[in-house]
Image (cartoon, rainbow, N blue to C red):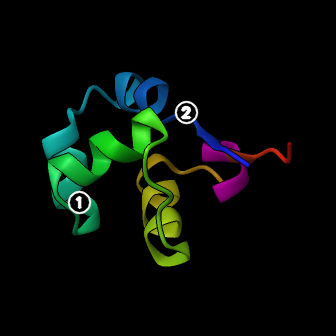
Amino acid sequence: MPLYNRLKELRARKNINQQELGKLVGASRQTISLIERGDYSPSVTLAIKIAKVFDVTVEEAFQYEED
């Protein structure tokens, strides 16, 4: 049951890298990378913080799909 995301696209729009996004949301660059690759699902709190950085809803940044 993967959690898909648009972080790479959203970062490109704002012209920020993984390190900068991590600083903005209180996470490491590695965590941001893992989330982007789909290897890690963020906590609700982190997902909300990420969505706020990009001024989108959590649903616009992340999409959950059942198998």
Q: Position of residue 63 (x, y in %)?
A: 72, 45
Residue 18 versus residue 24 in the image, above or below: above
Residue 14: numbered disc? none
Q: Amino acid at mark 2?
A: Arg
Whether residue 15 is situated above or below residue 40 in the rendered picture: above
From the viewer's side, name the closer residue of 9 and 32.
Answer: 32
Residues rendered magenta in the picture? 58-62
> 54 or 38, which is in the foreground?
38
The picture places residue 54, in percent across and down from the top left corner, at 47, 46
Residue 23: % across, % down: 16, 58
Q: Is residue 59 magenta?
A: yes
Q: Is residue 22 left or right of residue 8?
A: left
What type of secondary structure mainly makes up the magenta span?
A: helix
Question: Measured along the vertical axis of the image, is residue 23 above or below residue 29?
Answer: below
Which of the image's four quarters has the C terminus? top right
Element at label 2: loop
Tell me how far mark 1 sits from mark 2, CA to CA: 17 Å
1 or 2: tag closer to the N-terminus: 2
Instruction: Identify the image quadrant of residue 27.
Output: bottom left
| Residue on which the image places disc 1 | 24
Q: Residue at x 81, y 44 (%)?
A: 65
Name the residue tied to disc 2.
Answer: 6
Q: Identify the residue at image location x=27%, y=53%.
A: 31
Q: Secondary structure at mark 1?
A: helix
Q: Is residue 25 magenta?
A: no
Q: Is disc 1 surrounded by few (<14), some (14 to 19) or many (20+) residues within 10 Å? A: few
Q: Is residue 17 left or right of residue 3?
A: left
* Left or right: 66 as drawn, with respect to 22: right
Nearest the viewer among 8 and 51 is 8
